[in-house]
Image (cartoon, helix red, strand yellow):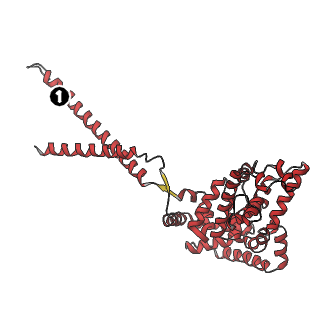
Amino acid sequence: MTLRRIARFTLLLWMLGSWALTGYILARHPFAQPLVERSAAEARVAFQVAMTRTVTADWLIPRLADATRNDRPDDITLYLDLAKEHHVLLPGALIAEAEDVVAAHEGKLATAKDCAICAFDITQCSSLTLIGACAIPVEMSPVGDVTALGRAAVAAVNGDEVDTLDAGLALVGLAASGLVIVTGGESAVAKAGATFLRVGRKTRALSARMVDALWDMVRELIQWNRIPAVLSRKAPLESAVDGVRMARLTAAAKDVGRIADNTSVGETLDLMQHADTVEDLGRIARVSDVAGKDTRKVMKVLGRDAFRLLLRVSDLAAAAIGLVALVLAQTVGMLAGFLRMTLRRLAREPRRRRPRGTVA
C-alpha cells in the first residue's frame, strides 16, 4: 500500500469517526439546555474581568461628577471605591468636592431629627445608610403589616377600592412572622423581602414593569368576598387565600430577603431598581450570592449584563458546536476535492478525443 493510499485511508477513518462522534453528541440533545450556571468562583472571575474592562477614567469621571453635582453620597462613595480598586486616577478638585458632599451627609446622620423624619417618611431619607438605620427597622415591625391588611379588609367590606398589592405583601409579612398561618411557617428572609418590596413600591424604587409583575401575582390572591366571614371568625384566613399565588409571592419575597442578607438593608432598595420581572429578583439574588458586599458595585458597573455572566455555554453544547464546525469543514474540503478532480478531468478530456495530426 502506497503512502498516498495510507494517508487517504487515515483521513477517511478520521472523517467517519468525527461524523459518528458528532451524531452521538447530537443524539444527546446538547442544545436542549445550551447554557448552564457558572460556579461561584467562575462567576466571580467573570465579574472581575468585565468590571476591569469597563471601569476606566472615561467611564468613571463623568459618573462621579454627576453624582457630586446631584448630591448622591452613596453613589459618590461607590465611585471613589471603584477608582481605588481599579487604580483610576481622578482629578484632585473632583475628589475634594465629592468628599465634601459625603462629609455633609455623615454629619446629618448624627442628628436624631433627621433620623426621626426618615423613619416617619422614608421618602425623606437622604441616603441608603439613613434608610437602613432609621426607616427599615420601623417598617420591619408587624404593626405595619397588620395595619395594611386591616385597611384593605375595611375597604373590601365597605366596597371601596382595595390596594391588593399592599395587602398581599402584608400577608406574606404576617405569614413569615408567624402571626397567621397561610403557607405554613415562612422564614425571616421572606418577612424582610416582603417589607423591602412594600418600601420599594412606596419610594418608587421598583420599576413600572416590576410593579405590574407584582400586581399580576397578587391578582385574586385574596378572595375578598370571604373576608367578612374571616373577620367574624366564621372561617380561617387561609380559606380566603390562593395558596399557589401566595407561594409565588413568598418566593419573590425570599429572593429579595437573600439580597438583603448578602448585602445590606439600604443597598437592597437600590439593587431592586435593576429588576423588571420577578425572575430578575432571583437573578440579582444569585449575583449577590457570588459578589456579596460588592453586589451594588457589580450591578452599578455591569447592569443587566451581570445576569448574562452568571451563565456559560455547557461543555456538551461547546463540544457539539466544535464537532459540527469540524464536520462542515470536512464536508467543504471533500466537495472542494471532488470539484478539483472533476475540473482536471474535463481539462484533459478534449486532448484525449483530439484526432491524430490535428494542430492544436
Let me know if residue 256 appears in the view: yes
- Where residue 87 sits: x, y (%)? 55, 73
**Residue nearest the observer in this picture, 49 or 181:** 181
Q: Residue at horizontal 63%, vertical 73%?
A: 80
Percent across and percent down for residue 152 are 85, 55
Label count reads 1
Q: Residue at x 66, y 56 (%)?
A: 275
Which amino acid, mark 1? Arg
Specify whether residue 204 is in view: no
Seen in the picture, residue 184 relative to 162 is either above or below; the reply is: below
Does dot 1 land on a helix, a strand or a loop? Answer: helix
- Quadrant of the image containing the N terminus: top left
Q: Is the residue 181 above or below the residue 109 in the image?
A: above
In the rendered image, which quarter is residue 2 located in?
A: top left
Q: Nearer the viewer, residue 10 or 54?
A: 10
- Give x and y (percent) for residue 330: 30, 42
The residue where tag 1 is placed is 348
> From the viewer's perspective, is 82 left or right of 23?
right
Residue 219 vertical position relative to residue 90 in the rendered view, above or below: above
| Residue farthest toward the front in the current orientation of the protein | 234
**Where residue 121 appears, x then y in whole percent?**
84, 67
Looking at the image, is 302 positioned above or below residue 103?
above
Q: Is 317 or 274 nearer to us in this picture?
A: 317
